[in-house]
Image (tube, rainbow, N blue to C red):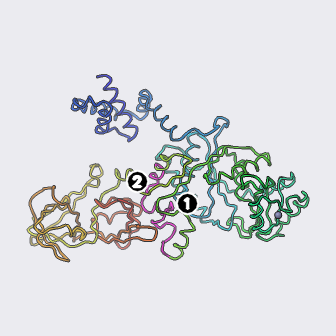
């Protein structure tokens, strides 16, 4: 018996750690799954589980954790985490682990950015290190101030949720860095490369450069003396070249097997005002140069990058070596795409401009903004990407997997309401003087309360609305249950009205319909995203109590699905359908 009690305690503690409180049912099934022979004594086992679960649920959090340690659960959890989140390479070589996310402020963050944010953040917190948010803003033609703010806002929401969901604290970045502020420093490094004979100014037109790189041919500028290069570089900075007329190129090897390594461009002229610096600069570093120098300057020890940049690693390592800058770990991770939904801003921009989409927060969009507006809790995103791990493989995810996480988070807490789409009147005849329905706010959480809807009959008749969507399935003479109100028998079904007779029965093995009183209801407009191009507006009535909802609240429409309150105007509640 003692080992059985130990087994029960083990599962009760695990269950309590996972869900806050242990529950009898899941513990019993775990115990039986491990010891099928106990099935015969299930009654006795249930009694024991009840006793142990009670005991465990009274323990303080710290005592619970101690117990988990004694039972080996902590160790087991650590191993599981390690499997999912393998240790960082060469971590022991650094006193403090520093990671960063380096988004370019060229659009609103989408689902495709969440992994790139969470992977370095999670590692920084697991190693009690530092996490930087760095704006990679050295391509002014596509960058805008509004995008910096959108990134700060959206990433902030996700990191806050990561603290709540994963306990990784603090749920924010430790420092914000604007890369373009360091452009003057980068000029100094550029000059050093020229002086050391490691870079030259090339004035070949772009097609020639491209052809030469493909063919492995060196151009005449490659062997210019250092003085000439310095002079041309000064000309670039002073406005002596127009956009496209001159490039500073790294001098590596024009026949290198990795074509990215064939004298890559590291600075170019861009004649476009920068969102922060205006016309202060006209020469900007390329991605390879700025990322290498910035990672080195800001003390990054582990730089996570999307796998598609892998051929660039060699270029970046070369730049660091030539400049005598500190090397650091570069880690690639796989890209995330969403099944059936493009993630590219280029794709959405015209749809927004033409009004097909209402804006970057349109709930049909895979932008973080759109997803939050649709009613997805940011913790669902965090949990989903945490479980996905930092893997190097490209993955295609489906929205339904994110919806499943969201359901798991919302189901235990979201209030339930009856919603009657496309309403039609039902007259209940021979009704008693008073009909009452006690609607629980949440069926398994009595502590969330009950609301009472009272209907009084007039001349023996009570009127309600039901959904005309239900009509097709109704038959005359059939008994129905009006959810938590009464049973009725259908008398006649007409295009604009259904009549029924009150039945003094509480049978629940009949069809159950949702309803709202005709005397008091809340008009509801429900926006159902169908695809990026399409949607459906469903009109209907909700329970009177829905009038008290406020914008941003998430509800569950009974047997319909989850929705978020988007706006309330003149008593009409506009909802966005999240998912079933
Ligand atoms: Zn050239």
Residue nearest the observer in this picture, 556 or 354: 354
Residue 307 x/y as whole percent: 61, 51
Q: Is residue 279 above or below residue 226?
A: below
Q: Earlier in the sequence, mark 2 or mark 1?
A: 1
Give, as a single range, the part of the protein colored magenta: 355-383
Ligand 1 quarter of the rendering: bottom right
Give the quarter of the figure containing the C terminus. Answer: bottom left
Instruction: Give the percent coordinates (x, y) of residue 5.
Output: 31, 26
Q: Is residue 144 above or below residue 216?
A: below
Which of 199 and 138 lies nearest the eye of the viewer? 199
Q: Which numbered disc covers residue 491?
A: none
Name the side, left or right, on which 381 lies relative to 208. Answer: left
> In the displayed structure, would residue 237 be above or below residue 66?
below
**Helix, strand or loop for disc 1:** loop
Which residue extends farthest front? 215
In depth, the one of 49 and 218 nearer the eye is 218
**Contact, mark 2 vs mark 1 (Cβ under 8 Å):** no
Q: How far, Cα to Cα, is label 2 from label 1?
A: 20 Å
Q: Is residue 373 magenta?
A: yes
Q: Mark 1, residues whose alpha carbon is within 10 Å: few (<14), some, or many (≥20)?
A: many
Q: Position of residue 262 (x, y in %)?
A: 76, 56
Give the residue at mark 1.
109
- Quarter holding the N terminus? top left
Residue positioned most to the top? 2
Q: Residues within 10 Å of mark 2 (few under 14, many from 20)?
A: many
Report the residue marked by disc 2: 406
- The picture quadrant where one finds residue 109 is bottom right
Residue 425: in magenta span? no
């Amino acid at each position: 018996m003692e080992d059985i009690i130990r087994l029960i305690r083990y599962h009760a503690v695990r269950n309590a750690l996972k869900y806050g409180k242990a529950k009898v049912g899941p513990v019993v099934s775990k115990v039986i799954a491990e010891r099928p022979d106990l099935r015969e004594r299930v009654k006795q086992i249930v009694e024991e589980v009840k006793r142990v679960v009670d005991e465990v649920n009274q323990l303080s959090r710290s005592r619970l954790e101690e117990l988990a340690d004694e039972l080996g659960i902590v160790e087991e959890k650590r191993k599981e985490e390690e499997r999912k989140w393998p240790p960082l390479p060469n971590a022991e070589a650094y006193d403090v682990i520093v990671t960063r996310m380096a988004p370019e402020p060229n659009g609103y963050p989408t689902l495709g950015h969440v992994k790139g944010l969470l992977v370095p953040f999670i590692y920084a917190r697991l190693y009690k290190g530092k996490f930087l948010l760095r704006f990679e803003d050295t391509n002014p033609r596509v960058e805008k101030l509004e995008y910096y703010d959108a990134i700060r806002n959206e990433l902030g929401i996700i990191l806050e949720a990561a603290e709540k969901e994963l306990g990784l604290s603090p749920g924010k970045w430790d420092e914000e860095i604007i890369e373009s502020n360091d452009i003057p420093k980068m000029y100094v490094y550029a000059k050093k490369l020229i002086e050391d004979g490691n870079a030259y100014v090339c004035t070949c037109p772009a097609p020639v450069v491209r052809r030469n790189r493909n063919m492995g041919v060196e151009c005449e500028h490659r062997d210019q003396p250092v003085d000439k290069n310095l002079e041309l570089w000064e000309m670039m900075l002073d406005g002596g070249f127009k956009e496209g007329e001159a490039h500073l190129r790294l001098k590596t090897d024009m026949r290198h097997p990795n074509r990215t390594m064939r004298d890559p461009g590291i600075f170019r002229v861009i004649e476009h005002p920068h969102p922060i610096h205006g016309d202060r600069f006209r020469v900007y570093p390329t991605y390879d140069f700025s990322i290498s120098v910035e990672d080195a300057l800001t003390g990054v020890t582990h730089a996570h990058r999307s796998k598609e940049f892998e051929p660039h690693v060699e270029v970046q390592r070369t730049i660091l070596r030539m400049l005598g800058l500190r090397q650091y770990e570069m880690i690639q991770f796989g890209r995330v795409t969403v099944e059936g939904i493009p993630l590219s801003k280029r794709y959405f921009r015209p749809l927004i401009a033409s009004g097909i989409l209402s804006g970057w927060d349109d709930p049909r969009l895979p932008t973080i903004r759109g997803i939050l507006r649709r009613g997805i809790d940011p913790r669902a995103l965090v949990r989903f990407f945490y479980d996905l791990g930092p893997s190097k493989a490209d993955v295609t995810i489906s929205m339904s997997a994110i919806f499943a996480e969201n359901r798991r988070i919302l189901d235990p807490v979201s209030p339930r309401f009856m919603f009657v789409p496309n309403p039609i009147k039902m007259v209940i005849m021979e009704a008693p003087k008073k009909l009452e329905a006690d609607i629980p706010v949440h069926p398994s959480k009595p502590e969330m309360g009950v609301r009472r809807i009272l209907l009084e009959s007039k001349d023996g008749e009570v009127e309600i609305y039901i959904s005309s969507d239900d009509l097709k399935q109704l038959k005359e003479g059939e008994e129905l249950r009006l959810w938590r109100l009464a049973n009725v028998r259908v008398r006649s079904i007409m295009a604009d009205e259904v009549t029924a007779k009150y039945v003094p029965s509480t049978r629940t093995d009949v069809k159950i319909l949702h309803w709202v009183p005709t005397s008091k209801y809340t008009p509801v407009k429900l926006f159902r995203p169908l695809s990026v191009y399409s949607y459906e507006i469903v009109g209907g009535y909700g329970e009177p109590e829905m009038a008290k909802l406020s914008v941003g609240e998430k509800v569950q429409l009974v047997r319909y699905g989850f929705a978020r309150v988007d706006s309330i105007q003149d008593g009409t509640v506009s909802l966005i359908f999240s998912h079933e």
